[in-house]
Image (spheres, rainbow, N blue to C red):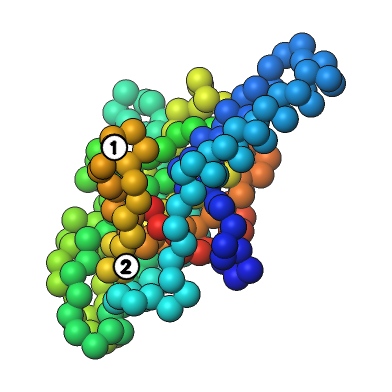
Amino acid sequence: MGGERGKARLHPNIEVRMKTACAARLSLPGFRTTAMVLAMLVCLAGAIDAASAQSAPEPARVSPSWTLDFEHQQPRVLTVREPNGRLRWFWYMPYKVTNHTREPQSLIPDVTVAYDNGAIIDADKNVPARVYTLVQERVGNPLMTTPAKMTGTMLQGEDYARESVAIWEHPDESERGPAGEMRVFFAGLSGETAAIAHPSEEGQTIVLHRTRMLKYHLPGRPRTPREQPVVFEAAEDVMR
């Protein structure tokens, strides 16, 4: 984030959707060079307008509120075979949260995953219980608890750190096509908030929360999600 303060920047969700719209427009069959240039200019103009109208505030360099320490591992893919023989793929990302502040804090993890093909998924929602069991066996961490048990008051110090895993199903690519980028948004780690005007309801506001964003590149076109390489690109805090 260094050096970017003062610039209008897209809200992370808006940026993902703008990239998706531009990519879809430029990939249409039969586009000639001139048409591609025009489409690119239209996309850029839209991005500039969106940045001006819906730019989001940045987190404080030194948060005025409490912030919990967050550690995470690389997301991986687990293949699950249904009784009917159908294969399903689930991403999982082990993580650890520690309270090093001066007092107990309330932890309510909220994990959302956004892909540049437009797919947005809430982690730990509609995930079969047996998938968590399989992930726990694969990770082999006896201290890991279920995502539901992560919510609650966190006492201070390493002895009271909590470890769990975020799990989400791989998005259906039959209509959207494969993704080349994945962003994991982890909210609930800080008490820092900011209010912005509601884009469509006059006089109303939206409260944004300081959120950790993890950005990953998904190169290539693997045959199955299990073979997908994952390249960590950046981690930063955003208001979301």
Pointer 2 residue:
192
- Of the two numbered discs 1 and 2 on the same chain, state the one appearing first in sequence: 2
At label 2, the amino acid type is: Glu
Q: Which one is in front, 47 or 129?
A: 47
Residue 23 in picture, x, y percent from top left: 64, 30
Residue 43 in picture, x, y percent from top left: 65, 31
Query: In the structure shown, which secondary structural element does the residue marked by tag 1 occupy?
Result: loop
Marks 1 and 2, Cα distance to the nearest angstrom?
A: 24 Å
The vertical placement of 79 against 190, above or below, is above
Residue 179 visible, this angle: no
Residue 213 visible, this angle: yes
The vertical placement of 76 against 95, above or below, is above
Residue 130 in picture, x, y percent from top left: 25, 45
- Depth check, mark 1 against mark 2: the one in front is 1
Residue occupying image coordinates x 60% and y 63%: 4
In contact (CB < 8 Å): disc 1 and disc 2: no
